Image (cartoon, rainbow, N blue to C red):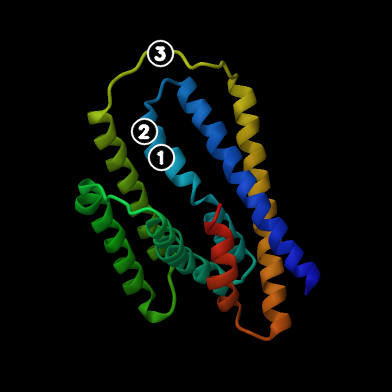
Amino acid sequence: MLIDSILVIVGCTLLYFGGERVVEGSSRIARGLRISPLIIGVTVVAFGTSLPEAFVSIVAALKGNQDICVSNIIGSNIVNIGLILGLAAFLCPLNVDKTLLRHELPFMLGISAVFVVMSWDYQVSRFEGAVLFVLFLLFNFWMIHKTRSNARVENTQTEQAHTLLKDSLFVLLGFALLVAGALLLVDGASSIAEFLGIPAWIIGITVVSIGTSLP
């Protein structure tokens, strides 16, 4: 039990540093290619914050632990809205941009509704997974198009020069840490669930989802 708990803690730590490396390295590469900071924000940074959840769920699915895979995704959304957003608003009231309410929020609710319908038969098929992935790509293409139409073209040089090779290695290091962290977290969480004699989804929707969301 102690060793498994340590594995979970180490796994969460590796996920945090791995996600940071991927976001930082990818942002440097994008800036080096003269990509708009706004586009970087709505793609690299936005996706980077979900990398821990993504890698843990993918690793769990590949290892046949479907309960942790699905419960981590659902739990992460609950943690992000209930815990993180709730605590942030409690400490300091937040203003919600009207564009979020008009565009992003409806899409979030819509794709959540699609997932509920797809999982009504207690499974999500490969085809349904592909549909969800295509919706994700369409949303990102739309966000990039909307951002580029509002962004100004900048010709300024970055303050610090970074070689493409160095930044690429930085990103690869981040992915390696993410994989290692996901493996440790999934193994540790599965062992804890088995030791306590509780369903794996309970650990996934609580411990795992909190561990992957806080970074």
- Place residue 181 in its image quadrant: bottom right
Image quadrant where residue 174 sits: top right
**Residue 66 appears anywhere in the view:** no
Helix, strand or loop under label 1: helix
* Image position of 184 (left or right of 127): right
Q: Say which residue label 1 marks.
A: 43
Image x and y of residue 175, in percent:
62, 44
Q: CA distance from mark 2 to mark 1?
A: 6 Å
> Which numbered circle lies on residue 176?
none
Q: Is residue 83 above or below residue 149?
A: below
**Viewer-nearest of discs 3 and 1:** 3
Image quadrant holding the N terminus, namely bottom right
Q: Which residue is mark 3?
A: 156
Q: What amino acid is found at the position of numbered circle 2 in the picture?
A: Ile
Upstream in sequence: badge 3 or badge 1: 1
Kind of residue sitting beneath label 3: Thr
Q: Mark 1 is on which residue type?
A: Thr
Q: SS of the residue at dot 3?
A: loop
Marks 3 and 2 sit apart, C-alpha to C-alpha, by 16 Å
* Cα–Cα gap, marks 3 and 1: 21 Å
